Amino acid sequence: MGVRAADVVIVGGGSCGSVLAARLSEDPACSVLLIESGTGVATRGPWPAHILPIGPGSPHAHHYATTLRHGVAGTLVRGRGPGGSGAVNGAYFVRATPADLDAWGRATGGRPGRTVWSYGDALPYFRRSEHDHDFGSSAVHGDAGPVPVRRRTAESWSAATDRFVAAAEAMGFPAEPDKNAGGPAGIGPVPCNIDRGMRVDPGSAYLRAAAGRPNLTVWTGTTVRALRMSAGAVRAVQVLRDGGLLEVQAYNVVLAAGAIETPALLWRSGIGDPRMLGAAAVHALPGVGREFSDHPEITIPYKPAPPVGDPVSGERAAPPILEACLNLDTGDGAVEIRPYTASFGDAVPGNPPMPPVLGAALMAPWGRGRMVPHPADPCGAPRIEHHYLSDPRDEAAAAAAVDLARGLLDASGMGTPIDGMPANLGTSQHLSGTCPMGTDPGTAVVDPRCRVHGIGGLSIADTSVFPRVPSRGPHATAVMLAERAAEFVASGLRVP
Ligand SMILES: Cc1cc2nc3c(=O)[nH]c(=O)nc-3n(C[C@H](O)[C@H](O)[C@H](O)COP(=O)(O)OP(=O)(O)OC[C@H]3O[C@@H](n4cnc5c(N)ncnc54)[C@H](O)[C@@H]3O)c2cc1C
């Protein structure tokens, strides 16, 4: 027997799911059920921005094994619980660039003057999502949105940031005082979703603020196992709740389980490449998991130079993990050099002590990763391969980025590379595009309005639908996408 729960069922209460639940339930006539596998709505507030609570055994994170490149294993982390990855991330809140969003338009079949996605299409939703405390309301910024955005001022920078920025300026890199203004790339402060030292993730900014609405129900500690479809439309979600399997009738379902669990849920429901799913295939969409993009990051450990100047103030004792960074658009790619303010050993509880690192990330890599279902267990973690630096252009760009980072380390006096500790290939944890948007169901999973091709009532609105990872961190763009997708869903609700 099914339970009729709501007009819209949202799967996953992470960065995007929190926005969707809050925006869709603004209409009192629209009942919304948000289902989130993690717990903590009653007990968990926001985290201090300098702590990433994602270490080994953390109840606030899912961990997945990946192969970053041949012979190099890695671990992927996703947040678990209201706010999802946004609740445990680095609080860097930088928008995709105009070029990124215009490329999304081309990838989703847009033509000049007729696009669903472009910088101009996205800008009102970036503005709507934020309260920019530094720039206030303007053509590019909002001052009334749920997410507070602030940049640390130069006077409050840590010694490492201060030295790094001075060196980048001295080397002639242009200033980028507002990384959310859509201007040319350069050196400047990182806009952060931080208020009084605490990370204000979408779980706090949107979901907690909406939690008292009578038309919004939030089930935490509840995992959606699969979707049930018939006659080409979604009919129900099957959930694991209170130790039992329950079927919830659903005529409008929005998946927001993130770039790893959304494709896994589609596969468990028989949606994907029939050659992979075999007899379990219900609906052919070969693009599920077929490729994804992410930002490889090479970290250079260094021994910090002794501090000079003022004694460390209370505020300086706990800066966010990244206060400023250098962005470069190289024509053939994009690079971000990150002077982290702390070692990951300090930032990630449970990690062993580690030296501080300078990160060099490829922000528009050519290489694509691939994800496939677990070969034996439909509920098991997918097999993930990043194929980082598999494209010779990425290999060359990575070598150049590491040279640049070493040059900045040397010129800045931040410290000295540690003998015997090589630069390390890792991931920025920005995995995107496992169910990409597009018009061709042979490659794309959702259309440009986030509707799953060929299945009525089913949409996806999370980082899995990005046509490709933006050339800046994805979080601000994920929130923007969810703002827009809430409107798409509201305008196309199916009635049972
Ligand atoms: C450690 C870390 C640091 C990062 N730092 C930054 C940063 O500083 N800046 C930046 O721009 N980006 C950063 N990112 C990336 C960014 O946070 C993510 O891309 C973004 O939050 C993803 O949003 P999402 O809504 O797609 O998924 P998520 O926020 O991951 O949400 C998915 C939610 O779905 C739930 N869920 C999954 N499966 C099910 C199921 N079957 N049933 C019910 N619920 C389910 C999960 O528990 C989770 O809450 C970071 C990511 C990580 C992990």
Image: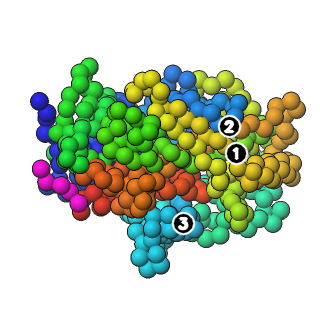
Work out which quarter of the rendered image holds the N terminus and state it.
top left
Taking 303 as reference, is 106 left or right? left
Q: Are marks 1 and 2 in contact (CB under 8 Å)?
A: yes
Mark closest to the chain's N terminus, 1 or 3: 3
- Real-space CA distance between mark 1 and mark 3, rounded to the nearest whole angstrom: 22 Å
The percent position of residue 391, horizontal first and vertical second, equals: 70, 49
Viewer-closest of 330 and 168: 330
The answer to whether the beta carbon of the residue marked 1 is less than 8 Å from any atom of ligand 1 is: no
Which label is found at residue 213? none
For residue 493: magenta? yes
The percent position of residue 113, horizontal first and vertical second, equals: 44, 80
- Real-space CA distance between mark 1 and mark 2, rounded to the nearest whole angstrom: 7 Å
Taking 237 as reference, is 114 left or right? right
**Residue occupied by mark 3:** 103
Residue interval drawn in magenta: 492-496
Q: Residue at x 73, y 68 (%)?
A: 174
Q: Amino acid at mark 1?
A: Ser
Quadrant position of residue 9: top left
For residue 238: magenta? no
Viewer-closest of 244 and 112: 112
Q: Up-down: is 384 above or below 244?
A: below
Q: Are marks 2 and 3 in contact (CB under 8 Å)?
A: no
Residue 439 visible in this rendered orientation of the protein = yes
**Residue occupied by mark 2:** 69
**Residue occupied by mark 1:** 390
Judged from the image, the secondary structure of the residue bearing numbered disc 2 is strand
Q: Amino acid at mark 3?
A: Ala
Q: Residue at x 13, y 54 (%)?
A: 495
